[in-house]
Amino acid sequence: MNNLVPTVLLVLLAFGPATAGEQDFTLVNRTGVEIYELYIRPAFADDWQEDVLSADTLPDGQEIEISFDLEEEADYWNIRVVDGEGDAIDWPEVDLTEISTIVLSFEDGLPMARYE
């Protein structure tokens, strides 16, 4: 019994940090517009979650750490940004467990994302 408690604590410490914040990432704005809102939802969901942008805005050329803890578990997530005019742009099915940085941009007028 005395050996059980340290073993359980060791297992919790080993696996706890690996799953906590698993979807957190750095967002780099290269869209040419200032981002006012950022929404993230599981790819299978119909409703957008709350705005997770931790600053008032994210100007073009800037980056920000995005931390969120949603109750849903998903392999793929949809990302939506909203600019100052209220226009929304979506990036579908992003595997946030495999990505640490997302660079959002436009190429030939189309929204593009580069993942690192």
Image (cartoon, rainbow, N blue to C red):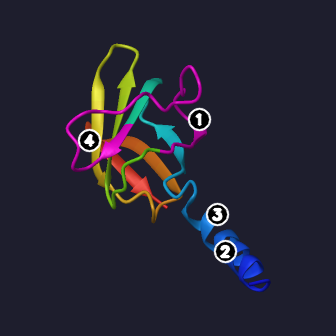
**Callout 4: SS:** loop
- Relative to 61, say whether 19 is above or below: below
Residue located at (33% from left, 42% from top): 41
Residue for badge 4: 108
Alpha-carbon span between mark 1 and mark 2:
34 Å
Q: Dot 1, crowdedness within 10 Å: few (<14), some or many (≥20)?
A: few
**Residue 57 appears in which quarter of the rendering?**
top right
For residue 33, say whether it is visible. Answer: no
Please identify the residue farthest to the front as the structure is shown: 1
Residue located at (29% from left, 21% from top): 87
Of labels 3 and 4, earlier in sequence is 3
What amino acid does circle 1 point to?
Answer: Gln
Residue located at (74% from left, 76% from top): 5
What amino acid does circle 4 point to?
Answer: Asp
Mark carried by residue 24: none
Q: Report x, y in % for residue 109.
A: 26, 36
Alpha-carbon span between mark 3 and mark 2:
7 Å
- Relative to 53, say whether 103 is above or below: below
Of labels 3 and 1, earlier in sequence is 3
What amino acid does circle 2 point to?
Answer: Ala
Mark carried by residue 14: 2
Is label 1 in contact with label 4 (beta carbons under 8 Å)?
no
Q: Dot 3, crowdedness within 10 Å: few (<14), some or many (≥20)?
A: few
Residue for badge 1: 62
Of labels 1 and 4, earlier in sequence is 1
Q: Report x, y in % for residue 55.
A: 59, 25
Alpha-carbon span between mark 3 and mark 1:
28 Å
Alpha-carbon span between mark 4 and mark 2:
46 Å
Of 52 and 60, the residue lying toward us: 52
Alpha-carbon span between mark 3 and mark 4:
41 Å
